[in-house]
Amino acid sequence: MVGVRPNLHFWGEAGWTSIAHFHRPGLQDASLAHPHRPGLQDASLIDEGETPTPLPFRRERGLVCAPVGDHHEKRGLSMPDHDLIVRGGLILDGSGGPGFIGDIAVSGDRIASVGDLGDATARDVIDARGQVVSPGFINMLSWATESLIDDGRSVSDLMQGVTLEVFGEGWSMGPLTDGMASEMRSRQEEVRYEVRWRTLGEYLAHLEAKGVAPNVASFVGATTVRINVLGYVDRPPTPDEQLRMEGLVDQAMREGAMGVGASLIYAPACYASTEELTGLARAAGRHG
C-alpha cells in the first residue's frame, strides 16, 4: 500500500471536505506537516487551483508562528501536545456505534487520541462543530490507475470522502511485458503518459514518487498475469506456464499486492479454469 496516513473527512454544507493532501516528492504529508518546517507548505494551504478549500484552520497564537526545536524552548514557549486537533465534530468512527461529539488528535502520522481533549494544544486546530467527522471511505473497485498519473489530486473522489483507492479487479498495472507496455501506450486516449514500469511494485512506486492525494493499494490482476505469459489465446496454460504465472503472483505479493483479483466475464479472463485460478490463489496465499 502506498502513502498510508490517517485520513479524515467532514460533511457540511459544502459536502465532503477531506484533510488528505497529496504527497510531493521529498515532502511530508502536507495534512500533517508542521506549517513552518523548512521546505514544507503550510498545512492549511494548497496550491492555487489544486483542491477545494479545506475547512478553516484556527491558528493558536504563539504556537503556529513560534520557532520550533531548541530555539522554541529557549524562548520559554511550551511545545504543543499534538500536530493537529479536530474539535467538536460529530464523530462516526466506523465501528457501527452511535455518533458522538468529540475531538480527534493527530501526532505525526498517527491518530493519538479521540474524545474530549479539553485543554490539549496543537500546532493546527480545525473547528469541526456542525460537521460529521469519519474515517475516509474506501473505493474497493477503483479505476483511477491512469487518472492519478495525469492528476494526482483525486479531487472528484476526495470530494466524495474517498481516501483509499484499491486497484486490480482482474487487470492491474503490472506485471507487464515490453509488448504489453507498448500496447498500453497505443491505447491511450485523453490521458497520455509514459509506461516507465514493468512490475506492479514499480507502478506503485511511480505513483508515490509522482505524488498522489489518496492512499492507494492494488491486487495483482489474474488477467494481467495470464496475458503476460499466454497472451490472448483461449487455451489452458502448460505446467511450465502455470508455474511462471504463479511466480509473477509471488513477485507481486512480495512487492505489496493485496492478493489476486479476477474478473471472469471478460476475455481472456474467461478462458481461465478453476485449476488455473486456484494455483494463482495458492501462490498469493503463501504470503498470508
Image (cartoon, rainbow, N blue to C red):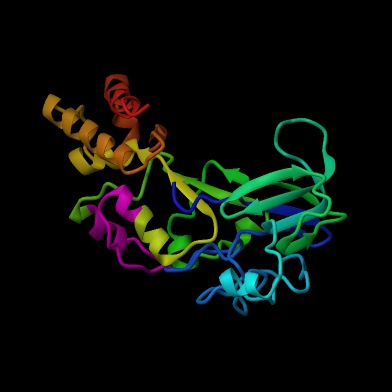
Residue at 33% x, 26% y: name it. 281
Name the spot of residue 240 as percent of width and height, x first: 12, 29
- Residue 27 percent across, percent down from the top left: 48, 68
Is 49 placed left or right of 117 in the picture? left
| Image vertical order of residue 266 relative to residue 44, above or below | above
Q: Which percent across, then down, holds residue 185?
A: 30, 63
User: Is residue 187 highlighted in magenta?
Assistant: yes
- Taking the image as shown, residue 204 lies to the left or right of residue 177, namely right
Task: Assign the C terminus to one quadrant of the image.
Answer: top left
Residue drawn at x 82%, y 45% is 116
Q: Is residue 160 left or right of residue 271?
A: right
Residue 240 can be seen in this image: yes
Between 43 and 274, the residue placed more toward the observer is 43
Residue nearer the viewer, 253 or 230 = 253
Using the image as rendered, state which of residue 222 and residue 56 is in the foreground: 56
Where residue 233 appears, as percent x and y from the top left, is: 21, 37
Whether 83 is drawn above or below 230: the answer is: below
The residue sitting at 48% across, 50% down in the picture is 216
Name the outermost residue toward the right: 130
Residue placed furthest toward the top: 275
Q: Quadrant of residue 271?
A: top left
**What residue is drawn where x is 47% and y is 61%?**
148
Query: Which residue range is magenta in the image?
Result: 180-203
